[in-house]
Image (tube, rainbow, N blue to C red):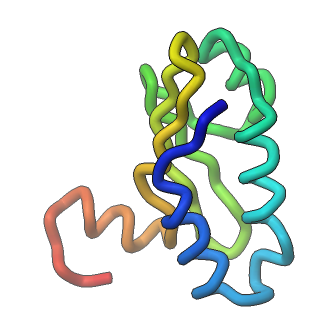
């Protein structure tokens, strides 16, 4: 899969330091190597992910999450958000509090 918005993952890795212990590079490698042809295949690969249409939420340890949009036909993934769950909730409700 072609990844777009990868800088959001790089920023998360930088902000968290060792807190995620290599989880971000591993996720990037998995996403880039993926050749999923349907959202069901993504759900099989990431069984704990929450999938709604083309939106995928992958929870990580310590309250972090990655939200992405997947287009299996085009073989593209857009990293929409990478950060804490609390900041994601604030972002969705329009709050400036992070």
> Who is closer to the viewer here, 75 or 49?
75
Quarter of the figure that contains the N terminus: top right
Total count of labels: 0
- Residue 2 lies, in percent from the top left, at 60, 35
Q: In which quarter of the image is the C terminus?
A: bottom left
Q: In this view, does 26 lie above or below 96?
A: above
**Position above or below: 9 against 53:** below
Residue found 54% across the figure and 29% down from its top: 76
- Residue 32 relative to residue 14: left or right: right
Would residue 95 appear left or right of 69 to someone viewing this image?
left
Q: Looking at the image, which is closer to me, 42 or 25?
A: 25
Name which residue lies at 41% across and 72% down: 86
Q: Quadrant of residue 65?
A: bottom right
Task: Kindly give the residue lying farthest to the front in the view shown.
Answer: 2
Q: Residue at point 47% right, 42% down?
A: 78
Q: Nearer the viewer, residue 10 or 44?
A: 10
Instruction: Judge from the rendering whether residue 42 lies leftward or rightward of residue 18; answer left or right.
Output: left
| Occupied quadrant, residue 94 | bottom left
Q: Is residue 75 above or below residue 49?
A: above
Q: Where is residue 13 in the image (x, y as percent from the top left)?
A: 66, 77
Image coordinates of residue 85 in percent, x first then y, are 48, 66
Residue 3 image position (x, y, % from top left): 58, 43
């Amino acid at each position: 899969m072609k990844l777009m918005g990868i800088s959001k993952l790089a920023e998360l890795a930088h902000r968290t330091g060792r807190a995620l212990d290599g989880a971000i590079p591993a996720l990037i490698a998995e996403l880039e190597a993926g050749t999923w042809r349907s959202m069901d295949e993504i759900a099989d690969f990431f069984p704990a992910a929450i999938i709604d249409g083309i939106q995928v939420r992958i929870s990580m340890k310590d309250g972090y999450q990655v939200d992405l949009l997947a287009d299996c036909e085009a073989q593209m993934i857009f990293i929409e958000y990478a950060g804490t769950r609390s900041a994601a909730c604030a972002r969705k409700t329009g709050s400036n509090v992070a």
